[in-house]
Amino acid sequence: MNFSQKLDEAVAASRSHVVVGLDSDPSKIPDLFLDAENPVLEFNREIIRATKEIVAGYKLNVAFYEFLQEKGIEALRGSMKEIPDDLITICDAKRGDLDNTSELYARTYFDTYGFDSITVNAYMGSDSVQPFLNREGKLIFILALTSNKSSSEFQKTDTGGMKLYEKIIQDSLNWGGGGRVGYVFGANHTDEISEFTKRHPEVPVLIPGIGAQGHELEPLIRNLHTERFVINSSRSIIYSAPKGCTLTQLRETVSASAQELNSGIRSVSR
């Protein structure tokens, strides 16, 4: 089964296009986990248990784990084991380097940790991402238009009748023989999302920027012309319960936050 097929099945089974971002910061997780041997791992386990029936998958930003050194790697491995096999997993690493270096990144995140997909920066060209494309059944999400404030400084630069992000998309669509490439579009780029998904409804799209980043859901959904999309939400779900909450309060609040986003997505007519 390739990534797109797994995504289709996960969305259909969960009736959800939501992926939860496990960007777990020890300074922000509820106090009840702070005495645990590995607070981040225990927190993540509870987030996954509270949401696994109502989401399509999970995205883990590796910076939050590498920062914690040995405990972080333990939390990353343990969190991946907790995620059901039928849900998609996204490694948010934004890698892209010389081919021999990218090969080691691919071994780490695909072969060792078992992620289904990874975010990559294609600025260095096709050979910098080829090792990721060589993994059967895996997918790379190439950065197209990101949701941060300064994204347009380079991404929308004119390259001679075509913006830089458009050039990246045009050249990369068939890398790996096709079917192994998706794209990251920030939720604020609704016009560009509309144009891309009309042309390429078969290509998976990862959309950050809803929730804590404050971009609106309704115009985004109205401009989507594909079912192969996932909307990532991190802070607005995993930190939705107060820091002094009980375990029951955490489970109920986190589940309700994920359900609210999912319901919002489904309520908008396209």
Image (cartoon, grey):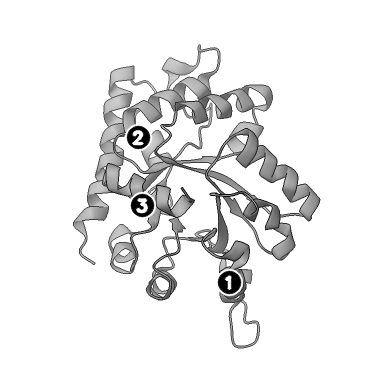
Q: Residue at x 30, y 62 (%)?
A: 221
Q: Position of residue 184 (x, y in %)?
A: 51, 59
Return the disc, 2 or 3, that comes first in the chain's sequence.
3
Which residue is the site of mark 1?
Answer: 165
Please state if 187 lies on the left or on the right of 146 as rendered: left
The crowding category of the residue bearing disc 2, from other C-alpha atoms within 10 Å (few below 14, some 14 to 19, many at least 20), is: some
**Quadrant containing the C terminus in the rendered view:** bottom left
- Is 106 located above or below residue 26 in the figure? below
Which kind of residue does numbered mark 3 sit on?
Asp
Along the line of sight, which residue is nearer the eye, 93 or 135? 135
Return the disc, 3 or 1, that comes first in the chain's sequence.
3
Mark 3 in CB contact with mark 1 (< 8 angstroms): no
Outermost residue on the bottom side: it is 161
The crowding category of the residue bearing disc 3, from other C-alpha atoms within 10 Å (few below 14, some 14 to 19, many at least 20), is: some
- Is 143 located above or below residue 28 in the figure? below
Q: Position of residue 232 (x, y in %)?
A: 42, 48
Which residue is the site of mark 2?
Answer: 240
Mark 2 in CB contact with mark 3 (< 8 angstroms): no
- What is the C-alpha distance between the residues marked 2 and 3? 28 Å
Which kind of residue does numbered mark 2 sit on?
Ser
Secondary structure at badge 2 equals loop
Q: Position of residue 174 (x, y in %)?
A: 58, 69
Please state if 151 lies on the left or on the right of 267 as rendered: right
